[in-house]
Amino acid sequence: CWEVIELIYGRSMGLISAGKDADEIIAAKEAAIKMGFGFGIVPWMARLLTTKFVSLRLQKPQYAADGRLIGIGAITEKIREPLKLAREGNLETVAPTILQHLIDDELDGGSAVQQDVTESEAMNAIFAGTGSTAAGLNAVLYELGIHGKWQVQVLIELQSLTPTSMETPWDLPYSGLSRLPYLRAIVKESLRLSPPFPSAFQREVSMNSGAVTIAGFAAALPPGTKISTNHYVMCRSRAVFGTDADEFHPERWLDTNDSEQLKRMEDAWSVFGRGARMCVGKDLVIMMLYKAVAAVLLQWEITGSANGMKRSNDFEFHVHELVVSLTPR
């Protein structure tokens, strides 16, 4: 899912076409995620980043034997060119990009501070939109590989959308895919069981809000209290999802007769966070998952096993291995 970068910058980083992490971009990103995970648990460690010794070491460029920039330096170099072209109005893309929107806002502001924000957001997209989207797609393919009957249900739905003039399965419109109840339920249930960011994001009770009362806690939480929720735990709550909370049952999202229960599940489904600070890329991720899953199912039958996915939690779910068989339809 590193090709999500094309939606952001209008061009690929070449990882898919190369078939390998030649510039150690993925390795650098994963190392940074692990470091960020540690800072999230022990926030005072983040102050180390501002020390001169650590800051200089992190900023020191790394080179391959042939002189190429690798790691974070390679990421920065690959971002710098489209940034420059976009600012000059010379970035040619086949569709509007997120980067161009950032640049348009920057040019409206016209300040150096705004340029810093643009460059920071451009870099953040590397860390926020790649591994999490890949983890989500892996989760859906894993569940479909084990529960083959749901592939049949989605294929039946897709037949209503498949135009005779469609060039590739990727041409299916999102406007149609988003209305397919079985596809929506399968993606939703897969993300519930395997939220890409299972760990907690900390928030602090505002000093201006006064004490906060949370259901289930006897005492009110005073201003300055650090609060966090674990998405993995919330999404498997038996109090909300029932005794089968650890099992893949997409039909739980299809039973609309019990509107109260459906609302309780929606409220607990915190895969992308909640409120004003929820993930801004939610709609983009869902669109990519719908289109990717539909394209795969139209071309292949997926077969997997319960122990076919190996992963770890380093702030986001890092899928080390997914073993499935793809049989052409």
Image (spheres, rainbow, N blue to C red):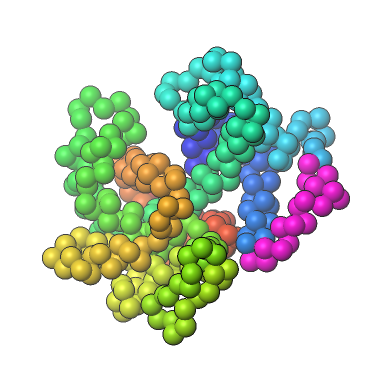
Viewer-side residue, 192 vs 322: 192
- Name the residue nearer the viewer: 50 or 134: 50
Q: Is residue 278 left or right of residue 319?
A: left
Q: How far across and how far down the image is residue 189, in percent?
A: 33, 60
* Magenta-highlighted residues: 41-59
Give residue 173's position: percent from left, percent from top.
28, 34
Indicate left or right for 329 with 89 as reference: left
Q: Residue at x 75, y 57 (%)?
A: 47
Q: Is residue 224 among the parts visible in the rendering?
A: yes
Q: Is residue 102 magenta?
A: no
- The residue sitting at 60% across, 60% down in the picture is 314
Place of residue 83 in the rendered image (x, y in percent of width and height, measured from the top left):
60, 25
Residue ranking furthest to the left: 257
User: Is residue 140 or residue 261 the one in the foreground?
Assistant: 261
In the image, residue 30 sits, relative to residue 94, either above or below, namely below
Residue 326 versus residue 167 in the image, above or below: below
Could you tell whether 257 is left or right of 247 in the image?
left
- Dominant secondary-structure state across the stretch colored magenta: helix
x, y (%) of residue 32?
Answer: 67, 51
Instruction: Specify whether 238 is left or right of 62.
Output: left
Q: Hey, which residue is sitting farthest right in the picture?
A: 53
Residue 42 is one of the magenta-drawn residues: yes
| Residue 327 seen in render | no
What is the quadrant of residue 37 in the picture? bottom right
Q: Residue furthest bottom?
A: 218
User: Could you tell me which residue is drawn at 54 percent across and 15 percent down?
Assistant: 89
Q: Residue at x 57, y 38 (%)?
A: 121
